[in-house]
Image (tube, rainbow, N blue to C red):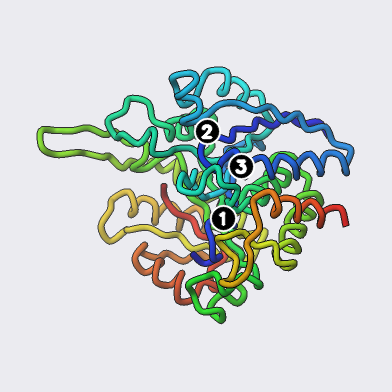
């Protein structure tokens, strides 16, 4: 097959680790007779240095045309001033928003040889195989932010539609796996969490009867993840 | 934390279509940048997710993941995962260990 892949190494170790994954993609292409057009572009601090913005228009244009984007990392002490107008992280947030990338998928499956590297007991890691599905374009990251005299305000907003679509993504993952879905929120305190919880229950009940859904408060979830991580299959949560 | 190092975890950011943005979950790690000691496995596993979800190349994705597993099995450990008393491999050496496994 032919594919256009945007390569965005960004800052710090980004370019070092992306070099290695590019080599692997080239090997895959060669062995499988595929043609991968791997086109590098600037993003983050590197883009600020050379172009004065974290997401130059030519990078965004490339990403719009690409089949996929391989991204390293952004940020570093050179651009850490919180008062700065342009910040490396804007590049990534802007890409997610403009391209509608609302579902962040993070698989976690510890390698048996590396159990000693984890701070958890080796026996607790037995059988751990989970996927975190994080909503990525809503919530407190994207709500209105302002200063009012001596106070600061961040706004957390979720719509029913935003919750429905991320829960559907997570439930589809669960169907491919052990069919267990854990939704994590703070419904004892936050109104957005209460909307989240009732919407998740409805979507799973009506559209995914084969998926078992449980709700956990974020505090309890943190504890259970350390105590019994192998009980988790797919986790869905807000940004 | 569970996996033992941030240097092992990939991620995908997806929308309604097949296009996705793939990135290791670790950040730019300025403290170790430029020293050739970063763990490339997260970035390589990220490429495997790209093959699977945006390009539909499941067999190729699995081959990459298995090559990473075997490279780790074979002791190609970067500084973040190397047990005390062993010599850690460099970023490039870890990458080469994966390529070697893919060619076997």
Chain of the residue displaying label 1: B
Q: Mark 3 points at which residue?
A: A16
- Disc nearest the viewer among 1 and 2: 1
B5, A189: nearer the viewer: B5
Tags 3 and 1 on a common chain: no
B19, B35: nearer the viewer: B35
The residue depicted at 43 percent of the width and 72 percent of the height is A224
Classify residue B63 by image quadrant: bottom right
Q: Is A172 on the left or on the right of A79, as rendered?
A: right
Q: Distance between the residues labelled 3 and 1?
A: 13 Å
Q: Mark 1 points at which residue?
A: B7
Residue A86 place in picture, x, y as percent: 37, 26
Residue A51 place in picture, x, y as percent: 48, 18
Q: What element carries label 1?
A: helix
Residue A203 place in picture, x, y as percent: 50, 53
Q: Which class describes the residues within 10 Å of circle 1: few (<14), some (14-19), or many (20+)?
A: many
B52, B32: nearer the viewer: B32
Q: Is mark 2 on a helix, strand or loop?
A: loop
Q: Is mark 3 on a helix, strand or loop?
A: helix
* B15 relative to A177, above or below: above
Q: Is A194 on the left or on the right of A73, as rendered?
A: left
Chain of the residue displaying label 2: A
Q: Distance between the residues labelled 2 and 3?
A: 28 Å
Chain of the residue displaying label 3: A
């Amino acid at each position: 097959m032919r594919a256009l892949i945007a390569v965005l190494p960004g800052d710090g170790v980004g370019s070092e680790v992306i070099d290695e994954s590019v080599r692997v993609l080239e090997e895959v292409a060669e062995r499988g007779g595929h043609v991968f057009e791997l086109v590098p572009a600037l993003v983050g601090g590197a883009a600020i240095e050379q172009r004065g913005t974290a997401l130059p228009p030519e990078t965004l244009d490339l990403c719009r045309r690409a089949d996929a984007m391989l991204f390293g990392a952004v940020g570093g002490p050179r651009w850490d001033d919180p008062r700065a107008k342009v910040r490396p992280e804007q590049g990534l947030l802007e890409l997610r928003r403009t391209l509608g990338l609302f579902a962040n998928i993070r698989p976690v499956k510890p390698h048996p040889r590396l159990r000693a590297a984890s701070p958890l007991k080796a026996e607790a890691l037995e059988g751990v195989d989970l996927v975190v599905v994080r909503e990525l374009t809503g919530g407190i990251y994207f709500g209105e932010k302002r200063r009012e005299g001596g106070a600061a305000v961040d706004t957390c907003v979720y719509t029913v539609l935003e919750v429905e679509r991320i829960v559907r993504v997570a439930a589809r993952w669960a169907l491919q796996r052990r069919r267990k879905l854990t939704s994590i929120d703070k419904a004892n305190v936050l109104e957005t969490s209460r909307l989240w919880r009732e919407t998740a229950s409805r979507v799973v009940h009506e559209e995914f009867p084969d998926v078992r859904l449980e709700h956990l408060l974020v505090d309890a979830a943190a504890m259970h993840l350390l105590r019994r991580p192998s009980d988790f299959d797919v986790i869905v949560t807000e940004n | 934390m569970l996996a033992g190092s941030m240097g092992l975890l990939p991620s995908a950011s997806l929308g309604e279509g097949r296009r996705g943005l793939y990135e290791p979950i670790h950040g730019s790690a300025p403290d170790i940048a430029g020293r050739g000691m970063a763990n490339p496995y997260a970035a390589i596993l990220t490429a495997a997710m790209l093959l699977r979800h945006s390009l539909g190349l499941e067999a190729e994705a699995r081959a990459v993941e298995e090559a990473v597993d075997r490279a780790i099995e074979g002791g190609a450990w970067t500084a973040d995962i190397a047990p005390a008393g062993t010599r850690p491999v460099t970023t490039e050496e870890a990458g080469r260990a994966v390529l070697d496994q893919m060619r076997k």
